[in-house]
Image: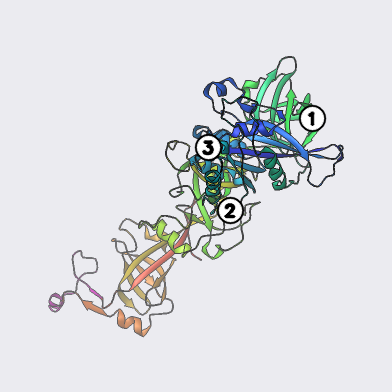
Amino acid sequence: MAGRRVNVNVGVLGHIDSGKTALARALSTTASTAAFDKQPQSRERGITLDLGFSCFSVPLPAAGPEPAEPQLQVTLVDCPGHASLIRTIIGGAQIIDLMMLVIDVTKGMQTQSAECLVIGIACQKLLVVLNKIDLLAEGRDRQQSINDQENAETLENTKFRGAPIIPVAAKPGGPEAPETEVPQGISELIELLTSQISIPTRDPSGPFLMSVDHCFSIKGQGTVMTGTILSGSISLGDSVEIPALKVVKKVKSMQMFHMPVTSAMQGDRLGICVTQFDPKLLERGLVCAPESLHTIHAALISLEKIPYFRGPLQTKAKFHITVGHETVMGRLMFFSPAPDHFDHKPVLDSFDFSREYLFQEQFLCKDSAPADGGEADQQADQATKGHCPQQQWALVEFEKPVTCPRLCLMIGSRLDTDIHSNTCRLAFHGTLLHGLEDKNYSESVLPRLQVYKLKHRHGLVERVIDDYSVIGRSLFKKETNIQLFVGLKVHLSTGELGVIDSAFGQSGKFKVHIPGSLSPESKKILAPVLKNPARAGRGEVPREEEEGVERPEPSQPVTLSLTFKRYVFDTHKRMVQS
């Protein structure tokens, strides 16, 4: 491993004008793709418009001082801060190992600062950089401002609680200050950063997959695709596929930050040169080993709601779904474990088609909106009984196909929300467990997905025929085909179990057979009381189906309850009881 550079990707995120690019410039020794706002549009507008990449190297913490010992190469991913560029930010966030959240100490935590916390979903570590401390007066006021930021509650309810905070001045005097101004606190930041980095385990095995963030041509050389290797490894002369275009090309040359290399592996920042390929065809996307990736039309994902997102996540709602650098619209259907499996440990690497799942009108969480009286909401309330399942899933149906690997990160958002509103646009994040490649997945795959709706119906016992039979009503509408429900079990509020035997007349009434017979107590409760005794006293016997005729009714109302499952993707729409 002598001479080997171990690469770690550090995201530089924060609100616009917090000084992210100045910080990246102050830290870096080598600039690469789109670094330091070198694009003309960025310079013209004075803001970062694209992902910028640069790096610096330090000795590995566990290595000795010898020159041949491996170096820790820290690749800085400078993300745009403007709210309108969130697609680009999300794409960059999915390749980083650690996040530096840059905060303008004179303004504190702002909307996009908090949004960046959410974007750092895939990271396990965060380092907060309080920038522009040179704009605070020396002495007690400066220290008080720093203390206030350190004591801010923004991180308290996140996994980044207790993250280290360090003050710096990346560009003392501001953008117009002369280059001779020396940045403050940078050496301390590098020392802190190095101590916080956990060397990730990189695996060279498995199929090659790279997330491409820039593609451009070099005259006389070919087309260069730069990006981060997500899995596997690659060597000179290997063939790679651009799956979105179904194009296969041979690797002519490779570089890491301007240094020619013959091989690279998972986690490395790499530039690949190929020939006879128009760079305009690929701005961002994936490059992989030939035939190792597939295009999917829908996906089953395990997901979690982002706490800062206001409002419920509702079934049938559409969200912007970001996978890598690609964002498409998708419609969701949420489902959970059956209620008696709510406490089961999450499984995040596969999806089990042999299990049954409970349909949900919305993602279940502690801040779920109360039921509005709808049947589905009542089902959710009864199922949760005050607690939420350990794991929930969604079927995501894409408006256009996407190409992505299994177990990749998916982020759902509402990017059409007004960027000036003080609200988080990121709604959920999830892991793709199973991709549906068949265009006709609704016929070929979904019938295997055992998601059911729990249906509850309630009616009344109208009268007793004999010890083993009663007539029920108010369970079905007049036009309902009761024959479909024959054989289903119903429970009487008096404790007996009955079975729907047949329709009774044409008004939605039905006959219920009681296999164990009615108990003496039930017969007493069901003893008829005439609602119009004067009329009955004249000896008139009302015809059973004559409309408007008053009939004897039980002295106390006895209810009938019918509960059954109906599977969402069952083409026969069968009703099933446990």
Q: Amino acid at mark 3?
A: His
Compared across the picture, whether 137 is left or right of 29 comes to: left
Q: Main secondary structure of the magenta part?
A: loop
Q: In this orientation, which residue lies closer to the viewer: 363 or 487? A: 363
Q: Nearer the viewer, mark 2 or mark 1?
A: 2
Mark 2–mark 1 contact, CB under 8 Å?
no
Seen at 58% across and 38% down, the residue is 13
Magenta residues span 533-553
**Residue with the mark numbered 1:** 238
| Magenta segment includes 115 | no
State whether residue 272 is above or below residue 534: above
Q: Residue at x 62, y 46 (%)?
A: 126
Q: Secondary structure at mark 1?
A: loop
Marks 3 and 1: CB-CB under 8 Å? no
Label whose residue precedes the other's in the sequence (2 or 1) = 2
Q: Nearer the viewer, mark 3 or mark 1?
A: 3
Instruction: Place residue 287 in its image quadrant.
Output: top right
Query: Does any portion of residue 9 appear in the rendered image?
Result: yes
Question: Which picture quadrant has residue 562?
Answer: bottom left
C-alpha separation, residue under disc 2 versus residue under disc 1: 44 Å
